[in-house]
């Protein structure tokens, strides 16, 4: 739905630092033992839900978020420095969705909730790790693993089903106190309410989450009377209940002032379902109520859903709630359909995660071959192809995983290129004698 605040961003965690090949210098010994240190890990990207952030606006300008890479290892088994994590504050209620798979990554629902959205790459092992009985002088070190990269969509969920809007002193807090157990401050002066209050109203067995929002004034969309902050909250409600004090001299002007500010703040607010109610009518003659209603209708149009209510006596309150319920049901229905669409497009995973990781697949392409699979691709990504010892180690792994046997069976020859990963970033020559 258009009014849900959303943003598309790319997150790139830090790459792991490379491991290093190095040997101890010892007197009388030509080459001491291997002492190449490991690379440091790349920084993670961590999202933290914070009450101090209200919208996803920041992400409109900062569409790529990166974390710092890990440092390379050094001699004497020294580890490279660890990459620094990047902590990103997001509004409470932010839903993180993987743009490519459309899977929900995390729902950061409560203040302080945190989640690593992209893991930094592991540092590569230095050659100190690779001593074995057959390999006393290991000349191989691993490259650092690349940090995770994801295209994400952030969606800010609704604050409430119904948002109460209107000029100061219109009777918004009173309405909330009557329809729910919430106890907002009520007083006969403007700007009594300074932060939104939430309450649950029940009508015919349906619960509606209602947000009492501070009064708006002319110029609110430009920040007057903190109006822009209040409008941010309005933006996060599905349906608006616009309250107008029946004692106002010019109710038509009261109505248009609010509508103008809503539209000026965000065009989608102008088309948000809106129910209008003239408030505080219990002490007024019917004629006056009718006159005020007509004045509003004259500017709002004949299709406007208009009620006359009194929170103190309860006149018309249930009718307003029923009408809100209908609009909220429509919005929920649309949201459910959208969720179903997302669910339908999710990939069906049949193998369990571990099998999936170890699984590989070989495809013939003329004289060449493309090997795919999580595990082998990860090994390839950490191999230093410029170092013959790194390539030898990768051949060992291909052999151990049974891939070499399969390549042989598929008639790979010494002139065949073996590509690893569908993107064909890594390749090596086939060798039967592996
Ligand atoms: N007679 C009468 N007075 C009402 C009714 N509803 C609200 N009031 C009075 O109107 C005044 C303002 O009410 P609030 O509910 O605080 O108004 P508000 O819209 O929340 O005001 P702000 O928070 O300042 O924006 C209070 O004195 C209420 O008692 C009603 O149905 N009838
Ligand atoms: Mg109030």
Image (spheres, rainbow, N blue to C red):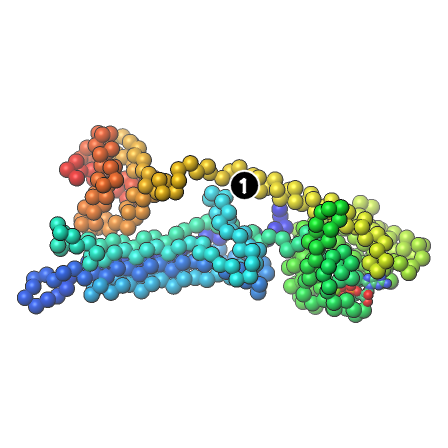
Binning the other alpha carbons within 10 Å of mark 1 as few (below 14), some (14 to 19) or many (20 upward) gives some
Is residue 7 at all visible to an observer of this figure? no
Q: Quadrant of residue 136?
A: bottom left
Of the four image quadrants, the one with ligand 1 is: bottom right
Residue 23 image position (x, y, % from top left): 15, 61
Q: Is residue 46 above or below residue 102?
A: below
Q: How far across and down, in percent of the image, does residue 99 sit?
A: 49, 46
Residue 235 horizontal side relative to residue 411, left or right: right
Q: Residue sitting at 24 percent across and 65 percent down?
A: 78
Choose between 38 and 205: the one closer to the eye: 205
Which residue is painted at 65% across and 63% down in the image? 229
User: Is 131 positioned to the left or the right of 263 in the image?
Assistant: left
What residue lies at 62% left-to-right and 44% top-to-bottom?
A: 335
Mark 1, ligand 2, within 8 Å: the answer is: no
Quadrant in which the C terminus is drawn:
top left
Pick whichever, 192 or 315, lies toward us: 315
Q: Is residue 90 visible?
A: yes
Compared across the picture, whether 344 is left or right of 81 comes to: right
Quarter residue 313 falls in: bottom right
Secondary structure beneath dot 1 equals helix
Taking the spot 45% from the left edge, 54% from the top edge, the residue there is 117
**287 in relation to 303, above or below:** below
Q: Residue furthest left?
A: 28
Please state the horizontal and vertical placement of residue 228, each as a whole percent of the image.
66, 63
Q: Badge 1 is on which residue?
A: 342
Numbered disc total? 1
Q: Residue 218, how many percent across, how many down?
A: 74, 64
Q: Is residue 236 left or right of residue 25?
A: right
């Amino acid at each position: 739905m258009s009014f849900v605040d959303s943003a598309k961003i790319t997150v790139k965690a830090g790459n792991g630092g490379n491991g290093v090949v190095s040997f101890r210098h010892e007197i009388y010994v030509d080459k001491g033992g291997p002492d190449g240190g490991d690379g440091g890990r790349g920084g993670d990207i961590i999202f933290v839900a914070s009450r101090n952030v209200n919208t996803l606006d920041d992400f409109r300008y900062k569409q790529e978020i990166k974390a710092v890479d890990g440092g390379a290892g050094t001699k004497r088994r020294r580890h490279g420095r660890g990459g620094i994590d990047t902590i990103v504050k997001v509004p409470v209620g932010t839903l993180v969705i993987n743009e490519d798979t459309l899977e929900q990554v995390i729902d950061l629902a409560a203040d302080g909730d945190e989640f690593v959205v992209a893991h930094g790459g592991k540092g590569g092992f230095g050659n100190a790790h690779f001593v074995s009985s057959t390999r006393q002088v290991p000349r191989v070190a691993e490259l650092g693993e690349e940090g995770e990269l994801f295209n994400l969509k952030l969606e800010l969920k609704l604050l409430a089903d119904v948002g109460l809007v209107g000029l100061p002193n219109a009777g918004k807090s009173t309405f909330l106190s009557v329809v729910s157990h919430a106890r907002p401050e009520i007083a006969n002066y403007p700007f009594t309410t300074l932060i939104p209050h939430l309450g649950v109203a029940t009508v015919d067995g349906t619960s509606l989450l209602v947000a009492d929002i501070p009064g708006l004034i002319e110029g609110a969309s430009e920040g007057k009377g903190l109006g822009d902050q209040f409008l941010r909250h309005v933006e996060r409600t599905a349906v608006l209940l616009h309250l107008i004090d029946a004692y106002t001299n010019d109710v038509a002007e009261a109505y248009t002032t609010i509508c103008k500010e809503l539209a000026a703040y965000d065009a989608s607010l102008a088309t948000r379902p809106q129910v209008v109610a003239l408030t505080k009518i219990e002490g007024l003659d019917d004629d006056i109520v009718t006159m005020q209603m007509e004045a509003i209708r004259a500017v709002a149009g004949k299709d406007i859903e208009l009620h006359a209510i009194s929170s103190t006596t309860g006149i018309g309150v249930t009718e307003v709630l029923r009408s809100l319920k209908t609009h909220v049901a429509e919005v929920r229905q649309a949201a459910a359909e959208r969720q179903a669409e997302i669910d339908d497009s999710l990939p069906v995973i049949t193998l369990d995660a571990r099998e999936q990781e170890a699984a590989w697949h070989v495809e013939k392409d003329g004289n060449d071959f493309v090997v795919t699979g999580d595990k082998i691709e990860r090994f390839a990504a950490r191999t230093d192809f410029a170092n013959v010892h790194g390539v030898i180690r990768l051949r060992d792994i291909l052999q151990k995983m049974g891939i070499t046997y399969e390549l042989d069976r598929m008639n790979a020859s010494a002139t065949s290129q073996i590509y690893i990963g569908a993107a064909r970033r890594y390749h090596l020559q086939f060798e039967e004698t592996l």
